[in-house]
Image (cartoon, grey):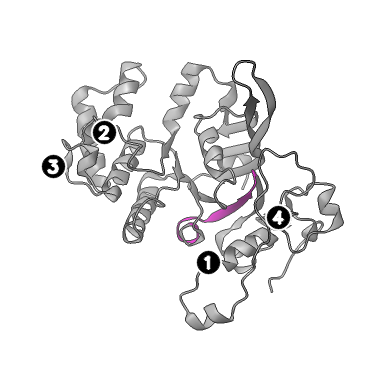
Amino acid sequence: MTEKDNLLDVRGLKVHFPIDKGIVFKRRAGWVRAVDGVDFHIGRGEALGLVGESGCGKSTTAMAVAQLQKPTAGDIFFAGENLGSLSPRELKRARMGFQIVFQDPYSSLNPRMRAADIIADPLRIYARKGIVAMSDGEIRTKAISLMERCGLSPSFAGRYPHEFSGGQRQRIGIARALALDPKLIIADEPVSALDVSIQSQILNLLKDLQKDFDLTFLFIAHDLAVIEYFCSRIAVMYLGRIVETSDAKSLYRNPLHPYTRALLSAVPIPDPIKERSRRRIILSGDVPSPSAERRGCPFRERCPEAMERCALEAPSLSTVEEGHEVSCFLFEGSKTVVGN
């Protein structure tokens, strides 16, 4: 895949939050390195899953890509444009191409707005700015159409968010994200707040929408089963950095990074015989604080295969086989790694 095939290209992304001490005379005491040098790309029509445990920086990455959080450093290229170099008006126009579906369907909808108005709101905003040329009637018609496409009856158009279930609210959020005909959907844990029975319905809806609207997805989750089902490629994140990327089949068949292996060993297997016989990898210690000064590999304190070198320098992502990259000295210089 060439750079021209990439819809989204993230290079050296860092998001650091200041830590201030003192009430009156504040002083800078340090930084929380939520995202600390992330590189990835997403091809057109692809679904990239960004996975990792809570606090690893997944959602902060999503907010930075969506331009809802200003990056500390790095570049985000969308459809060839560097979003950080755009003027406010240019960025507003570019934002039509990427929209976000939030994790919590209860707090991401305005409780004082009716369902159809929530979906139509982005179109009305852009129509007032003169960017979208649509009448109020056309906007209303499109909002109703998107409700139907996302599995909601048009008779629900006048209802308020509290009158819907969690799954229905998330459908409203998805319909709102589609209103401006985006190319990229950033889905930040879109099913984690829903019942398991509803999760599959929403995932199937997103799959259908991806096909019908030719959508590209940055799909963020901590549930590896969800990621495996929905995504064609996966990036594993730990403590603000990506430690492994691969297509989904290769990653599940042959995980390389010790952290990825530990994550996959914790995923339940439906077969009780295989479940009893497989070896679980239990990581020792806790995740280091993202505000602590770090040297070397961020995973070394919990890694069962850590070497002396790991404490001195940080490994970079290196290609082990085509489409499979890992940030670990165990595979430095390797061309092909055969799974166990």
Answer left or right for 127 relative to 4: left
Kind of residue at badge 4:
Val
| Label located before the other in sequence (3 or 1) | 3
Instruction: Give the structural element (helix, strand or loop) at label 2.
Output: loop
Give the Cα separation between the discs numbered 2 and 1. 37 Å
- Stretch in magenta: 227-240
In the rendering, which numbered label is found on residue 326?
4
| Label located before the other in sequence (3 or 2) | 2
Instruction: Give the structural element (helix, strand or loop) at label 4.
Output: strand
Kind of residue at badge 2:
Pro
Indicate the position of residue 266 as horizontal and vertical percent values. Answer: 56, 66
Kind of residue at badge 3:
Ser
Q: Which circle, 3 or 1, is nearer the viewer?
A: 1
Indicate the position of residue 16 as horizontal and vertical percent values. Answer: 64, 32
Instruction: Give the structural element (helix, strand or loop) at label 3.
Output: helix
- Quick one: 164 or 285, which is closer to the camera? 285
Q: Do tag 4 and tag 2 residues touch (Cβ < 8 Å)?
A: no
Q: Which circle, 4 or 2, is nearer the viewer?
A: 2
Which residue bears the numbered disc 2? 111
- Residue 21 lies within the magenta run: no
In the rendering, which numbered label is found on residue 267?
1
